[in-house]
Amino acid sequence: MSPNHRTLVLCSCLVLVAVLAAGCMITPATTPPVPAGVKKFNSTAEIEQYLEESAARVPRDSTFSTLVPTMAAGGISNAPQSWGEGAGTAIPAPALPGGTGYSKTNVQVAGVDEPDIVKNDNRYIYTVSGQDLVIIDAYPAASASVVSKIAIEDTPHDIFVRGNRLVLFSTGTDSPKTSISTERAEPAIMPVPTYYRPSVPVTHATIYDIRDRANPTVVKDYSIEGDYIDARMIGPLVYLVTREQIYPYRDAPLVVPALREGTRTVVQPDVWYFDHPDSQYTFTTITSLDIASGRERDAQTYLLGSGNTIYVSEGALYVSYPQYRPMIYRYEKNLPVPAITDSGPAAPSPRVQPDFNTLTGEERQSILEELRKGEQDAVLREEADQTTTVIHKIGIQDGAITYRARGEVPGTLLNQFSMDEYNGDLRVATTSSVYSPRYGQYTYNNVYVLDDTMARIGELTHIAEQETIYSTRFIGDRLYMVTFRRMDPFFVIDLSTPGSPKVLGKLKIPGYSDYLHPYDADHIIGIGKETATNDWGGVSTSGVKLALFDVSDVSNPVQLDKVQIGDAGSDSAALKDHHAFLFDKAKNLLVIPVRAVTAEPATRGDGYSNRPQVWYGAYVFGLSPETGFSLRGTVQHGSGDPGYSYYGSSASEVKRSLYIGDVLYTMSSRQVKANPLDDLATTLATIPLPPAGDVYYPVGME
């Protein structure tokens, strides 16, 4: 073989080896290009300069100015990110001899788990109780007991459980990682002592191996600067959202968030900012962790405004916050203010708006017409207070975190249910409240549709004027929305054509719903409060209200049935937290935690004036469109008088309920009760929980 031929063969072999090696390598996912208007800081000095320039745009005497801290010298570390080795292999839960079925956390998006204070599988209950993480061997109920209790040094919040892994989120504090100047910088709002050294909140994500439920062991304890905001879990991947406030003091240090394991920095996130300055700033960090392998996956930090509301689909995480633009902004910018001369029409006096509840329909329409015209005039003159909501879309794919787009809509969001992703579009429901000194307060509600780039492609505005949104639920191509001022307008809104949302029908009934939940395609469950007209013509709230709506005829929704529990002062954890709402259509089961106040006082016979009584526990219903709500029974956790409401919450208020097999478990701060679903009057077990801190126990409590 000639030398040239040998060389050719050798080169060919090397090429072949290279090709084969490349084929064996894991090809990284393609990173989408960074959208326009998104920039990355390269050093702490750049962050300092950006904040100072942003503050310069807002005058010192502004009601919404933000002071800029003096930054410590140094830069952002460019250390490579420590990636996990793939998604890892989930450690399956053992084949537990538990119940044949069990309830799961009530979540907004199927396939996207939400953290909560309690989780369960077909045998065990895992819960945060006071300062402890508690695991209960719950099934069979007759022998239920606490099998392990772990004291948490920091403040525990929520947990996730998947197979034999549990992750606990907690928040503590730490001293700033950088030193501060000993010289006073000129204060912009109020003097701050030179020794002032604010503590830095730190969020921990602690992953436990719980194969031995009696002896959980720590797999990893991650920490990152910032307060715990929320989290989601998709498969074994957890996405954690934290927020670190940039304090308005010049002598406070800037602490750039970093993901740590102990003292070791495992990921130094890139810090991103935008061409849309805000009046105040936070470091909002999104961190992804693989709880199956215990490895970190990614972390990215964004310089955003404050007040985050989070919505998460399977492919994107949306972070939103309000942006307030008061009319004083016009004057601080030295913009011309339209003058009203003596020869022109007189300026209307600020309207003292009457109580709409006392007006006739004709009087309301007259005032609304004036407010509509006034809004247009005030906006044109730029003398109206207005608030918009900024929404950032961040892609989450197999643990990778990638910024996608920014959008903005008028008004403010109520909660996470104000947003919903469907067929690539984001639907948003907001309440606008525009104030002008000429015309007063004008409130109305809106629905917006944004496409994949967060550009607005559809809108429906000025819904239910002078009312505010109390609850929303996007289901398929419809939005069900409840607003309230006097009556409960229940709206059915069509979103099948994203560019042209429209109201299909509405129903006005007394009361309101704080939470809406689908029963099936044609029926919606609502839970809120009942209302009634008082002696002065206004509206007073009374007991907890459950309602079932029939929306099969979208132009004419009907309330099929309703139930009222208790009188004025009654409440339910499900009104504020959807995780407290337990519904299983297949089991014909609806469980509501209730604090029921009875207006009719109990007989005491001690010579003192009688007081209304309060009952703590859970109401258990069956539910169908044919029969409506049917009470299956109640589980009581305590009783007494309602004096506690002035001093603190009661440890007997039920916070959550769940089922394992054929047993219902209800949980308050002091205990878990187990009752058969077919005989709720019988208590199979009462499992005491660790004390939940300083809780006021009213006299007479059971």
Image (cartoon, rainbow, N blue to C red):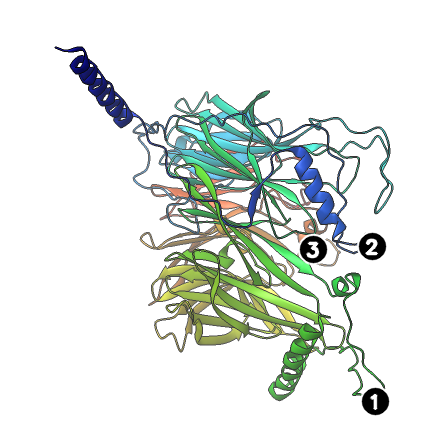
User: Closer to the observer: label 3 or label 2?
Assistant: 2
Instruction: Bin the neighbour count of mark 2 within 10 Å (Cα to Cα): few under 14, some 14-19, many 20 and up.
Output: few
Q: What residue is disc 2 on?
A: 61
Circle 1 sits in a helix, a strand or a loop, which is it? loop
Three-letter amino acid code at disc 1? Ser
Does 496 appear above or below 158?
A: below
Instruction: Bin the neighbour count of mark 1 within 10 Å (Cα to Cα): few under 14, some 14-19, many 20 and up.
Output: few
Q: Residue at x 54, y 67 (%)?
A: 512
Does 546 appear above or below 620?
A: below
The C terminus lies in which quarter of the figure?
top right
233 or 663, which is in the foreground? 233
641 or 412, which is in the foreground? 412
Compare marks 3 and 2 and give the one earlier in the sequence.
Answer: 2
Three-letter amino acid code at disc 2? Asp
Pointer 3 with pointer 2, Cβ within 8 A: no
How far is mark 2 from mark 1, CA to CA?
Answer: 34 Å
User: Closer to the observer: label 3 or label 1?
Assistant: 1
Circle 2 sits in a helix, a strand or a loop, which is it? loop
380 or 253, which is in the foreground? 380
Q: Is residue 598 visible?
A: no
Three-letter amino acid code at disc 3? Gly
- With 604 as the anchor, is 37 left or right in this view? left
Corner quadrant of residue 18: top left
Compare marks 3 and 1 and give the one earlier in the sequence.
Answer: 1
Q: Residue furthest left?
A: 1
Q: Residue at x 43, y 61 (%)?
A: 474
Q: What residue is disc 1 on?
A: 343
In percent of width and height, residue 196 lies at 81, 33
How far is mark 3 from mark 1, CA to CA?
Answer: 75 Å
Q: What residue is disc 3 on?
A: 605
